[in-house]
Image (tube, grey):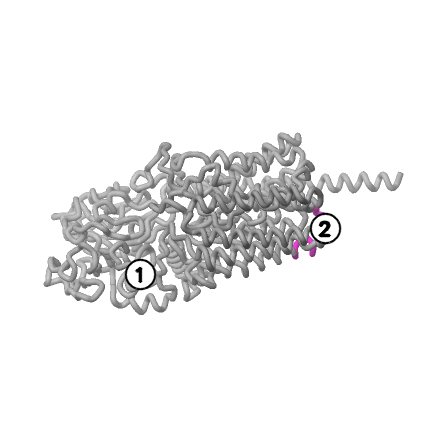
Amino acid sequence: MKSDLPLAHRVVPPILLAALVSVVAAIPLISNKWFYYWDDSAAAFTPGWHTIGERILSGSWPTLIPELWAGGNVTAEALYGTYNPVILLDSVAIALIPNLAIGITLVKMQFMAILAVGVYLVARQYGANRSMAFIAGLAMPFAGYTLYFDASSWASGLIAFAWIPHVWWSTRASALGRVNPLVPILFGYLAMTTGNPYGAVGVAVVYVAVIAECIAVKRGRSIKSLLISATAIIMMSLIVYLPLLFTTGVSVRTQSGISNDGSLRPDLGDLINLSGPSNQPYVTAFSVPAMTIPLVYLAWFLIPLAPWIQWGSLKKLGRHSVSLLAFGGIYVVLLLGPSNLWLFRWPARLLEYGQLPVIVAVAVALSAGLHRDRIRPRAVITAGLLVLQFYLAWSNVPEDIDIHFASLVITVALTAIALIVAYRKPRYLAGALAAGIIVVLSAQTNFWFTGNYNVTPWKFPRQVAFLESKFEDRYQGTTFAIADPEFIAADDPTGQWGDLLFGNAWQPAGVDAVNSYAGISYNDFVQELCINYYGGVKCPDAVDRLLAESPGTGVSWLDAMRVDTVVVQNSGPYGGKRSLDALPQSDWTIEPGHGVTVGHRESGHQWPDGRVSAATEGLDIRSDGAATDTRESVEYTGSGTVTFALLAWPGWSATVDGKTVETQASPGGLLQVNLPPSAADGSTLTIEFSPPGSSFGWTIAGVGLLVALSQGVWAYRHRRADQEETAAASADSVTS
């Protein structure tokens, strides 16, 4: 990527690319308006960011949101990116946009554009011309995994991956002395603070690959600078992962070790079939034996044009190709590994990372143009590859032969057009390739694979106003829903949305539901009440569990959580319209309905202004006030154990009249404090939450920032001194 090109030549192509990607990203919406509001994006990320955005707009920093219960520890969840400035701004935008689907779609289009520009810059840096770098950037956001899993469903994965190409080009440019080290540090920070561990691994692999290149091209002096930059990034980002690390002891994410159950684990044969638009690998994902999407698809032209591409032109990269090979090689090894490796699951999540150096290398090779000789043998090989591609796709899912045949016809036509253009008007080859990308995308998303049905579509209502009109007044106070989508009739997939929601979708509806989406969750709590990760409840005895005593509190779970509304799905195995008959009639009213039965608490809570839910005999709670999500004060006399309608996440601390006392968890995971005897005129208990490790994390982040700024200033002065020395030498030579 030449730095002496006119500014317009350097700036205009990536701007046009970003604009085009944003427009093309709307194509899947033609047939599926929920495409980007799908699975975890609908159940977790969009409503979660909406809630975080609301907290920010109200002046509250979102570290813990008690109303989300098992899913409320947003800092420990990490994936919400609460230390990432771009994600926080996007959260505010989602909170301000009245349509949740539109909000998350715009955010995803933004990151698809960021990804495309990053790929363009990496390709340019390795020597691809502008047109082929443009094609690489256009192809990557619409690759099978990137589009159908990250862009459609797992938003955090898209955001993390979008920054990796920028980390790559800026780190390499810094190593070559072309940009200040602050640039890769900034991009590395943005990638790491998404909270997505695969993004963190991506940053590490970039640095390993670029260091390997520095060794190969004998730029050893750059390695020290790279190590300093990497250290600064780690120090500045450590605060994101410390709360997760210190919370694993109470969460469901305590698994470690190595195992292989085959989930989302492609094999070598799948990895090399990069151009089959209809190829659905026989890879297991969430009980579905084959993919419902073209998982490993990257770009339609890679395999068909392989015999025509001037692969020999890659030799010009010389030892600079080491970083491409190192990056790709590391990810091939990881992709072929077991399905579970320590805390990392499902190798298919790394597909896009492994495909990144492939599309860059192809862009570099295509920049040399296509071969124009030996046309007949090359055409025969291309025909054979197309037939093989068709056969492999058909053998995976033979019942979709009509799709595979249509895919073959389209690919043959696009290949023929590309070859004719390359032979007659080679300058228009990039246009033919781009048109093919759009044609294939249109066929895939509007006719063959309109959505990723390996995961949950959900299709929640999208308008916040509609959600509020259906739920806000109906389900007031703390609400517990005993329901699961498994018990919704197959012929009425959206009939539930007037009565029930799942995951974090309750929050934009104005309902403080216990049933939130919980990535890490609180193990003891969810086990006691049979709550799964998306807030569903399948146990037939769920109502009995709710009415039973919460261990160690002396009151029922209903009272220990200060539940005001209970919603029971009539079609489930919970007892139908008589499911809530056991509720005390003096305190509750029951409303049987068509889809759900609802119980409303009529009596007030004993301590209405805070979250205290129980106190042992001998302890008199005079007052209780919750000032914020993370701070509460209780005035009391006597002594004993007080229970709060809060989960005992690591990070809660307590003081009595300024002296530290221990907090503890009830056997069911509720926060408790054993209060010492009060002063004669009463004492004050104050509880406060701070993410565990945050003091250390902020200190290290501050030191990391100083390291980054110091390195940036040193690099700036060193480069300026070199420029002045060069200018002086030039002046001396002219004078002499």
Give percent across and percent down for residue 673.
Answer: 22, 45
Question: Along the line of sight, which residue is nearer the eye, 112 or 261?
Answer: 261
Q: Is residue 466 above or below residue 559?
A: below
Decide whether residue 8 is among the magenta residues. yes
Name the quadrant of the C terminus.
top right
Query: Which-is-in-front pick, marks 2 and 1?
Result: 1
Q: Is residue 335 above or below residue 50?
A: above
Tell me the crowding category of disc 2: few under 14, some 14 to 19, or many 20 or more residues within 10 angstroms, Cα based: few
> Visible in this render: residue 126?
no
Extent of the magenta region: 1-12
Q: Which residue is mark 1?
A: 493
Pointer 2 or 1: first along the chain: 2
Question: Along the line of sight, which residue is nearer the eye, 539 or 195?
Answer: 539
Checking the image for residue 5, the label placed there is 2
Question: Along the line of sight, which residue is nearer the eye, 144 or 551?
Answer: 144
Q: Which residue sits furthest right?
A: 736
Gap in angstroms between the C-alphas marked 2 and 1: 56 Å
> Visible in this render: residue 538?
yes
For badge 1, the amino acid type reads Pro
